[in-house]
Image: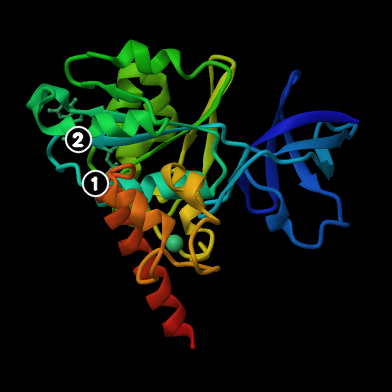
Amino acid sequence: MKQGRVLKAYNSFFYVLAPSGLVTCKLRGKFKNRQVICPGDLVAYDLLPDGTGVIERLLPRASLMRRPAVANIDQAVLTFAAAQPDLHPLLLSRFLVLAEWSGIPSVVICINKCDLLGTAADGFLEAYESLGYPILRVSAHEGNGVSALARLLPHHVTVFAGPSGVGKSSLLNAIDPALTLATGHVSEKIKRGRHTTRVAELLPYKEGYIVDTPGFSSMTLEGIEAQALPTYFPEMRPYLGQCRFSPCSHSHEPDCAVKTAVQEKKILPERYEAYLAILQEIQARKKDYQ
Ligand SMILES: Nc1nc2c(ncn2[C@@H]2O[C@H](COP(=O)(O)OP(=O)(O)OP(=O)(O)O)[C@@H](O)[C@H]2O)c(=O)[nH]1
Ligand SMILES: [Zn+2]
């Protein structure tokens, strides 16, 4: 049996990249639900005499991003703008939570449009580096930092995510114009409007892949459990299990180790506020269903 990586799923076909090239595959009938396999998955397939393939087996997954589903992403470049649109801590934390929840092991914060403001407006970002999120300041227009960004990509499966209008397409274009051509980003935007969800696709790039998925920008946190939320804040992890109550939502309970850490300035107030805001959103959603 041969192995390859699913670049795209379309109707009942899976486009699998193998060392020999791209193979159009169908699923063996035993997979009752074709949703079980998504772009990014590594699969084992049988090659038929006509050159097409039949997927027999799904190989173990390292991570899974939902909506759109993409497997095995090992790096997220969370892209924001220094201005236009302005950077807000809550929005930043929402994307960070989404990346942590998806199990993406390496997360980089990329601040584009630095030509507009330099570093004046993002002083608050330094603290995020100590949480383990490197910050890359770039300008797609002036080219600053673009080669540093490009150096992160070889040998990784990288998703570019971020709010609309921060310049993700411009950055991909600055890295390599072939990437924007491949995504058809601009023309599709005109044709189909901004809010159309499209199928996620992996674009091979220098021994790695770039995931083109504007859908990740929609930012629904649906599916995240309130109890698991603190684990998606790396700076809270050392305090979990140390509160008086168990479970503790770290919001209203007395003798809460997380709240104490906030008071002692071991956790950034804006991160704790983001935690509370997201928690409230999750709890409100639960009530909707009752
Ligand atoms: N000043 C400045 N403007 C930029 C830069 N990069 C992109 N822009 C502008 O920001 C706007 C949005 O850029 P896009 O590349 O379409 O942004 P996007 O993130 O792909 O947007 P969506 O397709 O909505 O997700 C465009 O008007 C770009 O010209 C930059 O480095 N500096
Ligand atoms: Zn607590």
Which quadrant of the picture is home to ligand 2? Answer: bottom left
Residue at image position (56%, 23%) is: 156
User: Which residue occupies the foreground of this view, 197 or 63?
Assistant: 63
Q: Amino acid at mark 2?
A: Phe
**In what element is the residue under mark 1?**
helix
Residue 101 position within the rendered picture, expressed as x and y whole percent measured from the top left: 52, 50
Q: Residues within 10 Å of mark 1 (few under 14, many from 20)?
A: some
Residue 208 vertical placement versus 26 (above, below): above
Q: Against 69, is 141 above or below?
A: above
Q: Are marks 1 and 2 in contact (CB under 8 Å)?
A: yes
Q: For the point 19% across and 35% down, which residue is it? A: 124
- Quadrant in the picture for residue 107: top left
SS type, badge 2: helix
Compared to residue 175, the image places residue 257 above or below, namely: below
The location of residue 277, given as percent across then percent down, is 30, 63
Amino acid type indicated by mark 1: Pro
For the point 47% across and 65% down, which residue is it?
A: 222
The quadrant where residue 207 appears: top right
In the picture provided, is 204 more to the left or to the right than 60? left
- Indicate yes or no: mark 1 CB to ligand 1 under 8 Å: no
Of the residues under marks 1 and 2, which one precedes in the sequence? 1
Q: Which residue is mark 1?
A: 89
Q: Quadrant of residue 114?
A: top left
User: Where is residue 31 drawn, in percent x and y?
Assistant: 82, 56
Left or right placement of residue 163 versus residue 53 in this view: left
Foreground pick, 36 / 103:
103
- The reply, left or right, for residue 144 in relation to residue 98 is left
Q: Position of residue 71 (x, y in %)?
A: 62, 42
Q: Is residue 171 left or right of residue 215?
A: left
Cα distance, mark 1 to mark 2? 9 Å
- To which residue does mark 2 refer? 124
The quadrant of the rendering that contains the N terminus is top right
